Amino acid sequence: MNLSIREFGLLSSKGTDNGLDYRVVPDAAYQELRTCALESTGRESSPQLLRLTSKHGMECVQACNYVGLIQTSDGCRIEILPKTSNHSEDPSNARMVLWRMLQTVLDIRAAEAGAASLSTLNRDWLEVLIEWVLNEISQLVRRGICSGYIRQVEQSPFLKGQLQVSRQLRLRPGKHDRFCVSYDQYLPDRAENRLIHSALKKLSRWTQLPRNQRLCRELLFVFSDIPESKHIKADLALWSDRRDMAHYQPVHPWVKLILADESPVFSAGQWNGISMLFPMEQLFEEYVAKKLISKLGAGYLLKTQARSKYLVRHLGKDWFQLRPDLLIQQGKRIVTALDTKWKLIDASANDGATKYNIKQADMYQLFAYGEKYLGGEGDIFLVYPKHDGFLSPLPVFEFNDCLRLWAVPFDLDNNLLVGGSWQQHSEWIKDTLLDVA
């Protein structure tokens, strides 16, 4: 069973479907989702993917701000799409927004993904990603699997390599016809290949598309003589970036994504299900950053997650690190700071009570960035996704006569910041903007 909801949509075993905001799932699947929500509540060590809530007196499981796909043990696949409108929306449009963002952030080149892959997007975009990963591994195999020297220690019937004298002297009586030796053997049993084998094993359980299953079996046969990784983190730390391993590099981020739990793992009790979930805040931030880089003027540099300033100094130490999402520099001069927020604000709610649904904490945060990074003088930005309730930049927010804040929409269809009067104070960006003024 395949179904789609969007961020903060509800899942229940009762009632009737209502677009992307309320879907009914089998009772067995609901119980697993409920268990996951209960286990993650109040646990700081892991992200909260689901939470329990109620609607019209009925208990429901609500999706949080993660997008992607999870699958329960009974085969129920739940696709979680980004919420790009406060009203009902076509799932295909939300799915295309998600796919474009994943293409950019994960460096998937559309031309190489192929039209055949894109044609399956409306059915299951996870299969598109799996096909892409398998094709990358196929290219690696065609260029050759790398081997490395592996230290072997054994009791051999003949002398080879280095004799381990201390071990030889400790041999039991009747074993002196053996030599305790160690030597290097050139084998494909190295960290990179073990990790790829483990990733293929996991993909073989995930995929349901016949051509992906077939390709997965072929690749598993190629890696059949190589053991799976028993220590994922240790092997990831051993991944080589030498020149002779350059053709392994395109596969590296995929292996990390599949095996290193960079995507949160959906779990219920002792059973682990499929999970390919992405935090929407982080996905939006990285997407905007990559799109803005191409729009910068000559001599300007975009830096993500700057960490050079602190809020206070106490007992001779810096406390409370300030990390703006994006920082624009010209040489050593900091030009501006931007923070991306995946939230649908309301441009019509301009009263003193609602305040466009902008969080007061975000204002405090941007004020601190302006004071510490810009010296209290200049322009800083809050970037929100453009939607039908936020089509053009808001009027300027003035912290004082010298420090201004602009709330600007980012158009996900055209991959542009929406232009306006803020451009008069922003020499750092090119004039390739969507202007609504």
Image: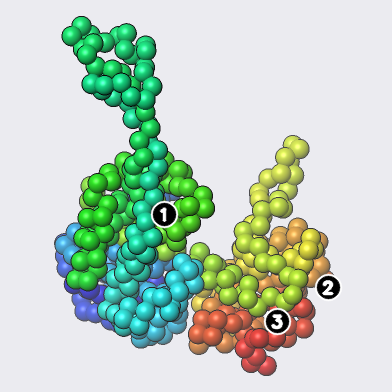
Real-space Cα separation, disc 3 to disc 2, in angstroms: 26 Å
Give the camera-side residue of 394 and 191.
191
Pair 1/2: label in front: 1
- Residue annotated with mark 1: 256
> How packed is label 2: few (under 14 Cα within 10 Å), some, or many (20 or more)?
few
Circle 1: residue type: Lys
| Image quarter of the N terminus | bottom left
Residue ID at (72%, 40%): 317
Amino acid found under the numbered disc labelled 2: Asp
Name which quarter of the figure residue 341 lies in: bottom right
Residue toward you, 311 or 425: 425
**Residue sitting at 41 percent across and 75 percent down?**
112
Residue, far bottom: 437
Foreground of the two, 422 or 224: 224
N-term mark: 3 or 2: 2
Where residue 430 is drawn, which disc sits there?
Answer: 3
Q: CA distance from mark 3 to mark 1?
A: 35 Å
User: Does residue 275 appear left or right of residue 316 in this picture?
Assistant: left
Residue at left 36%, top 53%? 145
Is disc 3 placed on a helix, strand or loop? Answer: loop
- Does residue 383 appear anywhere in the picture? yes
Of marks 3 and 2, the one in the foreground: 3
Q: Secondary structure at mark 2?
A: loop
**Sequence-earlier tag: 1 or 2:** 1
Rendering quarter of residue 157: top left
Under mark 3, the amino acid is Lys
Instruction: Kindly identify which numbered label has been placed on residue 401.
Output: 2
**In the rendering, which numbered label is found on residue 17?**
none
Which picture quadrant has residue 18?
A: bottom left
Lateral position of residue 330 relative to residue 12, left or right = right
The percent position of residue 356, horizontal first and vertical second, equals: 58, 78
